[in-house]
Image (tube, rainbow, N blue to C red):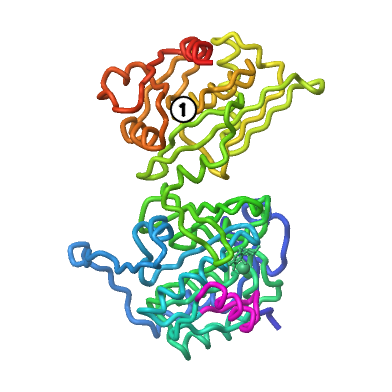
């Protein structure tokens, strides 16, 4: 008898009956995923009883805005691009224990005000969900819960209840019994996601799916599903710090550069509307090796603290480590400081860290990193009211950046009185009431300011 399932290469689509580490057709490694044979075959063979395919004139396609609704969490709505889109599939990824279940259960209260919500959990019993809901103040009469891991039972539940919103916790616990592979494997998570996508597109149900990511991001998790779903949001942060950052890695209905900031409390997640204040809280006073900068996260300027520690080399080879800041960029800044600023950092151990779990991807943070590194190397504190924004070039020049005025307004709002900026822009910017602008052309001038101010 022919087996019900087969292995399909996710790269070239080749079908084989046995699993192998390497695809026999295209040679790609680890790309074979198990899928039901019938569903694949069905699409190709039964077109005789299907309605004929008809293409649509582009002029006849309705361009009316997609229907959006608010989740009741402004920070989540922002990351989704202005609320959730009806009939879309949103994947919420993150490390275990980061707060994914909490976030999605919490929004049920608001969603229940206008829609029927079905929360399916394969991780907790209905009793456990109820206990958590009580703690979060969720008691909507429109919220139904189901503890289930079997895909066909989940689909039966959706058909029976006809919810408008479906929440699945988590994709790794869901399984299709037609596949032999265990729940959580690549084949299973892909197959189950495909089925959830059909629910979303076929019935117009908005689906939120939770996906766990392990530390290396390597389990069959959100990464392998990114291309299939409409939105992928990652919930990040340190389990030991109460702040959480929600970031969009993919969004078919909006930009991916907005972030949402939350704080985990005893009553669940609270929105942080002023992330700058949060990220700067607990900043050490008069300690060398820290400098504040301002980065643009989407349309919102956010202040961030760059910390550096430059210490005498402890081994044979200098150690380098960078957390929240691009490693290659940090190495480049160290080299520029050595060559153009004449600081002997190349033989030192160097650590760079961005406080609060933020990841800085903009070159605008270069200048603050250079100030923090120089301050640590020289063991001279940076004044607490000084910030820095600007990009550094390979010849040590300080280059202009975008959104400078917006960043400076945020820096001023948080009580800073001085800011180092690219000199060319210093002349264009209108003088600011409480913020003195220190224009610099190159690294040498930055080091001079540092020497003078301390
Ligand atoms: P959870 O949402 O279960 O994480 P995930 O679904 O991503 O695995 O969050 C678990 C953590 O959050 C757990 O360590 C307890 C903590 N927590 C609070 O601090 N306050 C709360 O109100 C809740 C519900 C959880
Ligand atoms: Mg959970």
Q: Position of residue 121 (x, y in %)?
A: 59, 77
Depth order, front residue of 66/340: 340
**Position of residue 259 in the picture relative to residue 290 (left or right):** left
Q: Please give the name of the residue rendered at 45% of the width and 26% of the height, measured from the top-left corner.
A: 388
Q: Please give the name of the residue rendered at 24% of the width and 68% of the height, measured from the top-left corner.
A: 56
- Which quarter of the rendering shows the C terminus? top right
Question: Up-down: is 251 above or below 43?
Answer: above
Residue placed farthest to the bottom in the image?
160
Is residue 120 in the magenta section? yes
Question: Up-down: is 146 above or below 193?
Answer: below
Is residue 59 in the magenta section? no
Q: Ligand 1 quadrant?
A: bottom right
Task: Say which residue label 1 marks.
Answer: 385
**Position of residue 412 in the picture relative to residue 59 (left or right):** right
Q: Position of residue 428 (x, y in %)?
A: 26, 21
Depth order, front residue of 348/158: 348
Q: Please give the name of the residue rendered at 36% of the width and 63% of the height, measured from the top-left corner.
A: 83
Residue placed farthest to the right in the image?
316
**Position of residue 214 in the picture relative to residue 315 (left or right):** left
Q: Position of residue 29 (x, y in %)?
A: 68, 52
Q: Secondary structure at mark 1?
A: loop
Q: Look at the numbered disc 1 and say if its residue's Cβ is closer than 8 Å to ligand 1.
A: no
Find residue 172 and report its image quarter.
bottom right
Q: Please give the name of the residue rendered at 50% of the width and 84% of the height, measured from the top-left corner.
A: 144
- Which quarter of the rendering shows the N terminus? bottom right
Q: Position of residue 138 (x, y in %)?
A: 50, 77
Question: Up-down: is 118 above or below 402?
Answer: below
Q: Which residues are magenta?
A: 119-137
Depth order, front residue of 7/267: 267
The local crowd at label 1, few if under 14, some if 14 to 19, many if 20 or more residues have their Cα within 10 Å, is some
């Amino acid at each position: 008898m022919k087996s019900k399932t087969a292995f399909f290469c996710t790269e070239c689509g080749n079908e084989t009956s046995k699993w192998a580490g390497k695809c026999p057709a295209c040679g790609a490694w680890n790309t074979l995923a198990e899928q039901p044979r019938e569903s694949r075959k069905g699409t190709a063979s039964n077109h005789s009883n299907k309605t004929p395919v008809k293409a649509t004139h582009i002029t006849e396609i309705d361009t009316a805005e997609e229907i959006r609704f608010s989740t009741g969490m402004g920070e989540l709505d922002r990351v989704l691009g202005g609320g959730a889109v009806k009939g879309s599939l949103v994947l919420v990824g993150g490390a275990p224990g980061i707060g994914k279940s909490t976030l999605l259960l919490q929004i049920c209260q608001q969603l229940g005000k206008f829609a029927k919500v079905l929360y399916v959990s394969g991780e907790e019993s209905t009793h456990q969900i109820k206990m958590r809901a009580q703690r979060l103040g969720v008691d909507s009469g429109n919220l139904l819960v189901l503890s289930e891991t079997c895909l066909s039972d989940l689909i039966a539940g959706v058909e029976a209840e006809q919810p408008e919103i479906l929440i699945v916790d988590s994709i790794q616990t869901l399984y299709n019994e037609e596949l032999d592979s265990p729940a959580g494997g690549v084949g299973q998570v892909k197959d189950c996601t495909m089925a959830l996508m059909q629910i979303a597109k076929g019935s117009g149900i908005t689906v939120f799916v939770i996906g766990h990511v392990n530390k290396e991001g390597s389990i069959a998790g959100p990464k392998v599903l990114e291309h299939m779903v409409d939105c992928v949001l990652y919930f990040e942060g340190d389990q030991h710090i109460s702040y959480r950052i929600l970031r969009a890695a993919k969004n078919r209905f909006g930009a991916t550069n907005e972030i949402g900031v939350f704080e985990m409390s005893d009553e669940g997640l609270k929105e942080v509307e002023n992330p700058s204040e949060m990220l700067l809280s607990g900043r050490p006073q008069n300690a060398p090796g820290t400098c504040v900068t301002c980065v643009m996260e989407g349309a919102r300027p956010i202040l961030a603290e760059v910390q550096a520690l430059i210490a005498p080399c402890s081994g044979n080879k200098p150690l380098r480590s960078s957390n929240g800041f691009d490693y290659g960029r940090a190495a480049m800044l160290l080299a520029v400081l050595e060559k153009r600023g004449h600081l002997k950092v190349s033989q030192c151990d160097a650590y760079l860290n961005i406080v609060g779990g933020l990841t800085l991807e903009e070159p605008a943070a270069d200048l603050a990193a250079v100030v923090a590194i120089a301050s640590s190397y020289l063991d001279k504190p940076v004044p607490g009211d000084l910030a820095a924004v600007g990009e550094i070039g390979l010849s040590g020049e300080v280059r202009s950046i975008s959104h400078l005025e917006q960043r400076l307004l945020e820096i001023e709002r948080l009580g800073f009185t001085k800011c180092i900026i690219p000199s060319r822009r210093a002349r264009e910017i209108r003088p600011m009431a409480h913020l003195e602008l220190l224009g610099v052309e190159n690294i040498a001038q930055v080091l001079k300011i540092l020497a003078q101010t301390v």
